[in-house]
Image: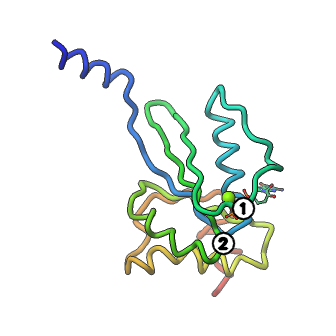
């Protein structure tokens, strides 16, 4: 009986958890995106003032519930010396959001090079779902950003 009830409880209330990495250059807007997502999807979350967000050294973790899924966002620091840590998290995650500041054209090439880091470390291609909005691998500006 306990097993039946516990199974029913889990079916009703337990959420499937997914880990999503948020990557991109420093100053691209990763932490701002995470804060905005938490404010938008978590009813009782009182978002921090966006002007108080400072550069990430290490990792911010944020959780967002969407329907029956619980998304654990890992927002990593984008500074050059921190980019070598990305692939450690890449192996553990289910998806990646790569954030690009499309107004910062001077750093597009740098962003494209950084985008190539994790597969280069793994000798592999990106094999995870990638979400890109606006500027992305299919966009002519990104295509033209030859390293
Ligand atoms: N105008 C504008 N400013 C933004 C937007 N997103 C982020 N910013 C600003 O860009 C700056 C950097 O944002 P962060 O969210 O800290 O960038 P980050 O990618 O987390 O940077 P690191 O933690 O250093 O890797 C902050 O001053 C933000 O207020 C946006 O969509 N529009
Ligand atoms: Mg940050």
Which residue is pictured at 31% across the width and 24% down the height?
A: 11
| Residue at disc 2, CB closer than 8 Å to ligand 1 | yes
Label 1 CA crowd tier, 10 Å (few <14, some 14–19, many 20+): some
Q: Which mark is residue 113?
A: none
Tell me if 129 is positioned left or right of 62 in this view: left
**What is the spatial separation of the Cα atoms under label 1 and label 2, in whole angstroms?**
9 Å
Secondary-structure class at tag 2? loop
Secondary-structure class at tag 1? loop
| Residue at disc 1, CB closer than 8 Å to ligand 1 | yes
Q: Residue under circle 1?
A: 55
Which residue extends farthest right? Answer: 51
Tell me if 30 is positioned left or right of 16 in this view: right
Question: In x, y percent, where is residue 98?
Answer: 59, 62
Q: Are marks 1 and 2 in contact (CB under 8 Å)?
A: yes
Above-or-below relation of 47 to 116:
above
Q: Residue under circle 2?
A: 79
């Amino acid at each position: 009986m306990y097993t039946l009830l516990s199974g029913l409880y889990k079916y009703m209330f337990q959420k499937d958890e997914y880990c999503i990495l948020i990557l991109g250059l420093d100053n691209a807007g990763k932490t701002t995106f995470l804060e905005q997502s938490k404010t938008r999807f978590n009813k009782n979350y009182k978002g921090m003032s966006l002007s108080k967000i400072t550069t990430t050294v290490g990792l911010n973790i944020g959780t967002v519930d969407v329907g029956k899924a619980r998304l654990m966002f890992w927002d990593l620091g984008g500074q050059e010396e921190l980019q070598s840590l990305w692939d450690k998290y890449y192996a553990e995650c289910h998806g990646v959001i790569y954030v690009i500041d499309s107004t910062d054209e001077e750093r597009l090439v740098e962003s494209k090079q950084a985008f190539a880091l994790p597969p280069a470390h793994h000798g592999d291609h990106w094999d995870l779902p990638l979400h890109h909005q606006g500027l992305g691998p299919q966009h002519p500006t990104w295509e033209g950003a030859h390293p």
